[in-house]
Image (cartoon, helix red, strand yellow):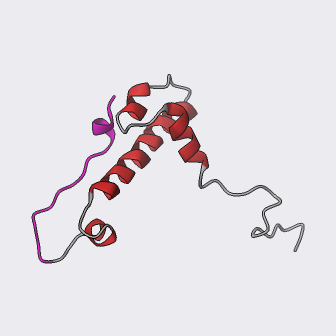
Amino acid sequence: MTHQDVWYVRRSPPSSTPSPSAVMTAGGTAPMEAALGRLAAMRAHMRRVHLGEERDPSIAHGVGMTGSGLEALYRLPAPGHAVCPYVVHRSQG
């Protein structure tokens, strides 16, 4: 499986209205396309991990990362532990 099997960029015909990715990247959509590719690869990799399937290094290598890098990316937005000051638990409130 390669990252092309998991994700593709839908290219629409040129129009007078710029795409959101063009607006956010000042016209250069390559950074946005790369980020979306990494997120899709992370999802495919972690799905295999959670289903107990064999890890496929070609998924990570397809976007220029390693399997451990994709797993670190997966943990990045994880919620904080119970000591996180921005979370009010029922037992505290």
Identify the image quadrant of the N terminus.
top left
The picture quadrant where one finds residue 77 is: bottom right
Magenta segment: does it hold 8?
yes
Q: Position of residue 42 (x, y in %)?
A: 46, 42
Q: Position of residue 35 (x, y in %)?
A: 39, 52
Left or right, 51 with reference to 31:
right
The answer to which of 12 and 35 lies nearer the viewer is 35
Q: Is residue 50 above or below residue 22?
A: above
Residue under the image location 72 percent in, 57 percent down: 80
Residue under the image location 50 percent in, 22 percent down: 54
Left or right, 63 with reference to 87:
left
Q: Is residue 1 above or below residue 87?
A: above
Q: Residue furthest bottom?
A: 16
The answer to which of 58 and 1 lies nearer the viewer is 58
Residue under the image location 81 percent in, 58 percent down: 82
Residue under the image location 89 percent in, 70 percent down: 92
Q: Is residue 17 above or below residue 1?
A: below
Identify the image quadrant of the C terminus.
bottom right
Q: Position of residue 61 (x, y in %)?
A: 39, 31
Magenta segment: does it hold 26?
no
Left or right, 21 with reference to 89:
left
Q: Magenta region: which residues? A: 1-16
Tally of marks: 0
Q: Position of residue 89 (x, y in %)?
A: 82, 66
Secondary structure mostly seen in magenta is loop
The picture quadrant where one finds residue 59 is: top left
